[in-house]
Amino acid sequence: MASLIFRRRFTHYSPPRSLLHDNLEFYCRSWESKFRTPFSMCQFVRQLSNSARAMKVDFTDLTQPHTWYPKARRKRRNVILHVGPTNSGKTYHALKQLESSCSGIYCGPLRLLAWEVAKRLNKAKVPCDLITGQEREEVDGAKHKAVTVEMADVTSDYDCAVVDEIQMLGCRTRGFSFTRALLGISVDELHLCGDAAAVPLIQEILKVTDDIVKVQYYERLSPLVPLKVPLGSFANIKTGDCIVTFSRREIYSIKKQIENGGKHLCSVVYGSLPPETRTRQATMFNDENSELDVLVASDAIGMGLNLNISRIIFSTLKKFDGVEMRDLSVSEIKQIGGRAGRYRSIFPVGEVTCLDAEDLPLLNSSLSSPSPIIEKAGLFPSFDLLFMYSRLHPTYSMHQTLEHFLENAKLSANYFIADCEEMLKVAAVIDELPLNLNDKYLFCISPVDMSDDISSQGLTQFAQSYSRNGIVRLREIFTPGTLKVPKTQTALKELESVHKVLDLYVWLSFHMEDSFPDRELASSQKAICSMLIEEFLERLGWQKPSPKKLLGRSRLKSLSSQDSRHYF
Ligand SMILES: Nc1ncnc2c1ncn2[C@@H]1O[C@H](COP(=O)(O)OP(=O)(O)OP(=O)(O)O)[C@@H](O)[C@H]1O
Ligand SMILES: [Mg+2]
């Protein structure tokens, strides 16, 4: 590791651009060679729109998505599907191949997984860049990359690629990015890791690509035992237990109940905690010398974190999914339950149970059933297609373009169109502003949480300021030095939202570098948010702070001395 110099290079990185122009540029260059005439992109697009109109080309025809990736189609890829239950060594084996390849890319569903893989490869003296929507860590001489799946590079050639948790291609909102990686990565050897439920669909999808597909099945490396008795009461909690529940209010209430018993201290992990805070909470739980010996978590632990869990206890088997309260699915129960008993950890045998006896039948039947087969993969039009479509309908707003495109989209039986509710909400907001389609598309695909008031307000202000001045200074809407340790749940939630807005700024800064120049400030304020949240979590328990932690606290005090009532 010493010989590898991690360098943060805040330069414009090509994948976001290629995300927008996967193919247009490619076709433009092929036309140039075909007609032996140089085309500017602008001439090319004009020409293409005219011909499309004349030839009645239907840009909403998405029935052949494999043809969107000409570079990958020039190869006959060896595709190896590593499938099996959780904790069966699927990712481990795929990463071994990546590590021994000359060049490669790992695509994971979470930033935490990309971080872990970059760390692992660099430690093994295989220089590896880390690229997520919000981070670029480039390593000298790197020919490998660990990325979040949305950043999968479909424009370069690789020897080896790994797409982890490939069953997520069936996810309503993010599935299309897995489909893009599956069809689009130009690689000799493609390793796909995940649930066996995705095998028939992937085999079907890859029939038209001429790739060679092999399936490798895995068995669990350590036993997973469904218990016959429920936990009954939090008085029966033991070291190494993880209680799973689905609302942050419940998470904090359970943490309090357990800690009031005076025997255990709890780490917490849930979706809206900053990723670095989640990692640190998990690390403290894993550390045998730390006093935090119990975990209270949401389904955010279902993927990505390496946890030394002895027993998973479902406090409920119901979850609010944004629309309604529903039972957990078989695959959710298996994925979460399977976190108990990590191979080669201090708890090699995992156990699973519920808090209440009435949930045991559903738990046991789910654990013993196979996950239902995934029938369709997500798809979303590339910017190119939307762009060409909008040229044919120049009076449409972004919202109308998206809505009409999706309504008219034609799909083959293996695909469904991604759920674009969030994007349509953003489109409705930014259509009020004088922005071009490219900018609007970027705001639409940005990682904003429109159900969070502060987060959506942040996006609106960024877009307004950008359309007005062409440049967005963070200080216009955020005063550094105003953050402080939250004292209430409401203040905590607010700080989590502030973190999301800063995260959004960093994301935008990677796509529009000149217009969002304060990336470093936003990143440092994000780090402060995470520290303050951790400070809150620490104060919530009865743990005595160590002298080292007290030192950190006084530094934070000076940063948070002013009132933080409002940032946006
Ligand atoms: N052959 C092996 N030798 C040493 N450690 C291994 C081996 N196989 C797997 N492991 C370790 O076991 C743990 C589980 O492996 P891995 O993460 O590959 O499982 P997985 O099947 O991908 O699980 P999940 O479905 O949860 O992603 C990891 O900590 C991994 O490093
Ligand atoms: Mg895995």
Image (tube, rainbow, N blue to C red):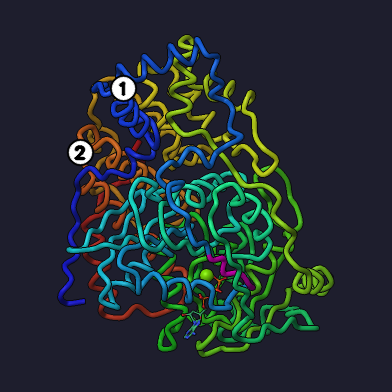
In the image, residue 391 sits, relative to residue 365, either above or below, namely: above
Residue 35: mark: 1
In the image, residue 220 sits, relative to residue 531, either above or below, namely: below
Position of residue 225 measured from the top left corner of the image (x, y, whole percent): 71, 84
Nearer to us of marks 2 and 1 is 1
Please state which amino acid type lies under the numbered disc 1: Phe
In the picture, which quadrant includes the N terminus?
A: bottom left
Using the rendered image of the protein, determine whether residue 360 is visible from the camera's viewpoint. Answer: yes
- Whichever of callouts 2 and 1 sits on the residue coming sooner in the sequence is 1
How crowded pointer 2 is (Cα within 10 Å; few <14, some 14-19, many 20+) is rated as: some
Q: Which residues are magenta?
A: 80-84
In the image, residue 124 sits, relative to residue 194, either above or below, namely: below
Residue 76: mark: none
* Side of 161 relative to 142 (left or right): right
Between residues 50 and 528, which one lies in front from this camera angle? 50
Please state which amino acid type lies under the numbered disc 2: Pro
Q: Residue at x 56, y 21 (%)?
A: 58
Q: Residue at x 82, y 71 (%)?
A: 365
Position of residue 549 measured from the top left corner of the image (x, y, whole percent): 29, 74
* Side of 281 relative to 155 (left or right): right
Position of residue 296 measured from the top left corner of the image (x, y, whole percent): 57, 70
In the picture, which quadrant includes the C terminus?
A: top left
Residue 517: mark: 2
Q: Is residue 161 magenta?
A: no
The majority secondary structure of the magenta stretch comes to strand
